[in-house]
Image (cartoon, rainbow, N blue to C red):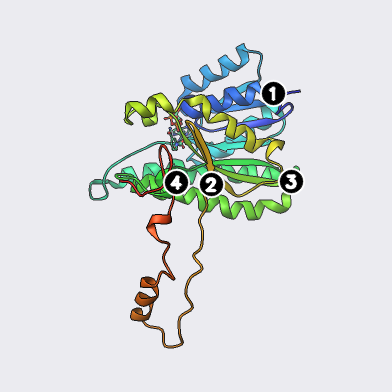
Amino acid sequence: MALLDGKVAVVTGAGAGIGRAYVRALAREGAAVVVNDFAREAAEDAVAEIVGQGGRAVANVADVGALEGGASLLSSALEAFGRVDILVNNAGILRDASLVKMEEAQWDAVMHVHLKGLYSATRPIFGWMKDNGGGVIVNTTSTAGIRGNFGQSNYGAAKCGVIGFTNSLAIEGRKYGIRLWNIGPAAATALTAHMPEEYQRRFQIDRVAPTLLYMVSHLSGDQTGKTLLAGGGWVGEVRFEVHDGYEPSDDFTAEELARAVADGKVLFPDRDAKWVTAYGPSGKREG
Ligand SMILES: NC(=O)c1ccc[n+]([C@@H]2O[C@H](COP(=O)([O-])OP(=O)(O)OC[C@H]3O[C@@H](n4cnc5c(N)ncnc54)[C@H](O)[C@@H]3O)[C@@H](O)[C@H]2O)c1
């Protein structure tokens, strides 16, 4: 028996790139898939490939950032397969520019797909899962949202926002058996075509999907609300930690805080931080 026999998965932005590798892997493990991509040809091609190999798949060509597009993901799954067990919010775009050069349209386009798309796609499916025994939802973050990246204030804001969305929804979903994950992939795709040759060589696209399969299957038990970075030769959890901190005196001042900072009681020492780069963890801050 395959890992996901009888399951139904919806994957957004699955006509190309990482999403395409996800739907191949999900179908190989027995899941029926709704292949969403607003690039029609790509979505239909992915479906033809899966069906040609004996899998079950239908295309959905909606823009996930539009409310009706998000709602259509649930309808596609119910009409074709009668249920939905897995949602992977993967669709994404870049509109890079340093902030002073960034036009409103670049800001809005990124928010539309990465954040409005989360709301539009997840709300209907979360509602269905809540009434039908639960499910797993995987949202897509990026190191750009965790440590930042030059020229990506729009994308970084959206991708950190994804983590906040997931954290809250993990709490809301707990009593309904709905598990949440963030995945921060690294893979050579159209989106990362600008990255150096080493990136293209090292980050083969098929090396992300095993992490997704772990997340959406029984293999991850009841884990929820966690963030895994996955790509190339490395997989690891990222989490926000709180410093032990400092308890101010009753007549607390900014100078007192400055002394506490100097004594190492407030800020994490930079040298101990493990900074995540596109290539995995590194002991020092780069860039
Ligand atoms: N490639 C990487 O190394 C990397 C790193 C960090 C995060 N990510 C994230 O992983 C996800 C997948 O990225 P990728 O590299 O495979 O990109 P990609 O460009 O290869 O594929 C993205 C797909 O999403 C589709 N899409 C875009 N906007 C859409 C919309 N509004 N509605 C429906 N479909 C839409 C595109 O047509 C495309 O087929 C994205 O969320 C991206 O931000 C990728």
- Element class at badge 2: helix
Judging by the rendered image, the residue that carries numbered circle 4 is 159
CB of mark 4 near ligand 1 (< 8 Å): yes
Q: Earlier in the sequence, mark 4 or mark 3?
A: 3
Amino acid type, label 3: Asp
How far across and how far down the image is residue 173, in percent? 67, 51
Q: Nearer the viewer, mark 2 or mark 1?
A: 1
**Numbered tag placed on residue 30 in the rendering:** 1
**Numbered tag placed on residue 131 in the rendering:** 3
Q: Earlier in the sequence, mark 2 or mark 4?
A: 2
Amino acid type, label 2: Tyr
Q: Is residue 106 visible?
A: yes
Q: Earlier in the sequence, mark 3 or mark 1?
A: 1
Nearer-the-camera pick, 122 or 96: 96
Separation of disc 4 and disc 3 at Cα? 29 Å
Asked where in the image residue 36 lies, by quadrant, the reply is: top right
CB of mark 3 near ligand 1 (< 8 Å): no
Separation of disc 2 and disc 3 at Cα? 18 Å
CB within 8 Å, label 2 to label 1: no
CB within 8 Å, label 4 to label 3: no
Is 286 situated left or right of 141 in this image? left
Separation of disc 3 and disc 1 at Cα? 24 Å
Label 2 neighbour load within 10 Å: few <14, some 14-19, many 20+: some
Q: Earlier in the sequence, mark 4 or mark 1?
A: 1
Q: Earlier in the sequence, mark 2 or mark 3?
A: 2
